[in-house]
Image (spheres, rainbow, N blue to C red):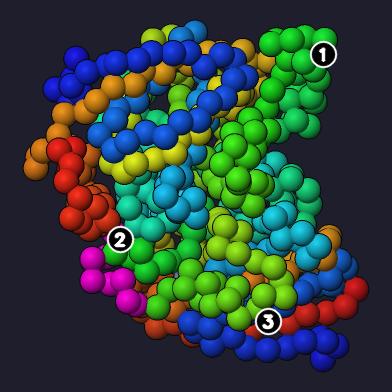
Amino acid sequence: MDTAIFNEAIMAGDYFIHPVMAGQTVRIVDIEGNEAADTLFFSLDDPSERYSAMDTVREQGNVYLSTGSQLRSNLNRPMLDIVADTCGRHDTLGGACAGESNTVRYDLEKRCMHSCRDSWMLAIAEHPEFGLHKRDIGHNINFFMNVPITPDGGLSFQDGLSGPGKYVELTALMDVVLLISNCPQLNNPCSGFNPTPLGVLIWDA
Amino acid sequence: MSDLIRSIDYQTEIAPGGHWSLRLRRGTVMRLTDITGDANLGLLMFNPDNLLERYNAPDTLKCQHTFKLTRGNCLYSDMGRVFASIIEDDLGWHESVCGNSHAELVNERWGARDFQNDRNAWHQNGHDAFLVEMAKYGMDLADLPANVNFFNKVVVDDHGRMSRVAGHSQAGNSVTLRFEMDTLVLLHACPHPLDTASSYPARPVKVELGTAEPVRDDDYCRNFCDENQRGFRNNALYYLGQFSEAV
Ligand SMILES: [Zn+2]
């Protein structure tokens, strides 16, 4: 940990945007447990190439992410490898919370509650240097989230896999932009109704 | 004819490997029929008045706590609105997480066949088919989200391993959408990315278009869950002040 070239905390409800170069390893830490890191990756050279949940789950034949998963782009190219995981399972189907979907999921008057997609919108507005646009913001990874699929085709949002200090590590296979929303969700039991900080560390190859 | 459908006014066929796009008004119904069995119909939806609003598979699945799509389910945009409701379905299961076949996959599994040599029997893939249709509206790769794959059942075991159920759809099986918003619809009839048929699955899909009866207070899709009632209310807000007999 002492050798990390970067070590920062992301407060609940904040975004984090940072390049991770090929060969570097990034660790995302669930510092207090029960948090969701809503994460997107883009090619640094051409952000229209980006993390694709569909290509990733199809190529690995599995809907969950853990050690050994290779994150693939919408051109079906390898972007990052998950090289360590003390949590065990991460979701990439459930997507991110948004003011608009909160009106459907919870109540028509939940629109104004803070959300991951709003964090991403602020990130792309405040960081034009990465060339990101609303159309680039899509199907994300939810690190530390457990969203099991039942045999009869149901989808459930469950608590319990992550805990304080659990982390996931990824090694970049191409130069990427990492965009995280530290989920501010106050309506979902997955965060224990108490969003908490995440940590991000980066090591050189 | 279903008491939800007023008329069927047009019918066509998407040839194997074919693709199409068109703008549908709200109150339109679209019935898709598997002609030979084991077909795949890839579908994407955009708001023609704002192409940044598009079909959102994660919101669709989590809003209805489902992994599969069937009768009663609504197909949501990223703006909390309902593009379309599934008002009829013979199959009980359509999937929306596997994405498209792409050129490399098709070439490896079934061999590369090009138009120069094979004319309309070439091996088109779903990824390129969508890019072709999207380009007609000024969209490109960055605009391509997860799509629906109608007629396909993909199951997941306790460890998350996925498998496609071959033969899930039989000749004559159909699914019908009722559009609740004006919608730009993109379609292709390219193979499902998990289809392991021994030869390129060349399977056409029939498309029928018509008009829906007005959505009633006791409508099955609208009342399928509390979430869909709220989705319909978001649609009503979107169309506030506009007269339509469809909503
Ligand atoms: Zn969130």
Give the CA distance from mark 1 to mark 2.
Answer: 50 Å
Q: What is the residue that sits farthest to the right in this orientation?
A: A205
Give the CA distance from mark 2 to mark 3.
Answer: 30 Å
In the image, which disc is placed on residue B116?
1
Which residue corresponds to the image point at 28% horizontal and 22% vertical from the top-left? Answer: B210
Locate the C terminus of chain A and report the quarter of the image it occupies.
Answer: bottom right
In the image, which disc is placed on residue A105?
2
- Which element type, helix, strand or loop, lies under badge 2? helix
On whether ligand 1 comes within 8 Å of the CB at mark 3, the answer is no
Q: Chain of mark 1?
A: B
Same chain for the residues under marks 1 and 3 in the image: no
Q: What is the residue that sits farthest to the bottom in this orientation?
A: A2
Which residue corresponds to the image point at 46% horizontal and 31% vertical from the top-left? Answer: B22
* Placement of A134 over or under B174, stated as above or below: below
Question: Which of the marked residues, 2 or 3, is nearer the chain's N terminus?
Answer: 2
- The amino acid type, in three-letter code, at marker 3 is Val
Give the CA distance from mark 1 to mark 3.
Answer: 52 Å
On whether ligand 1 comes within 8 Å of the CB at mark 1, the answer is no
- The amino acid type, in three-letter code, at marker 2 is Arg
Query: What's drawn in magenta, residue-wise?
Result: A104-113
Identify the residue position indicated by label 3 in the image: A200
Which residue corresponds to the image point at 72% horizontal and 18% vertical from the top-left? Answer: B123
Q: What is the residue that sits farthest to the left in this orientation?
A: B217
- Which element type, helix, strand or loop, lies under badge 1? helix
Same chain for the residues under marks 2 and 3 in the image: yes
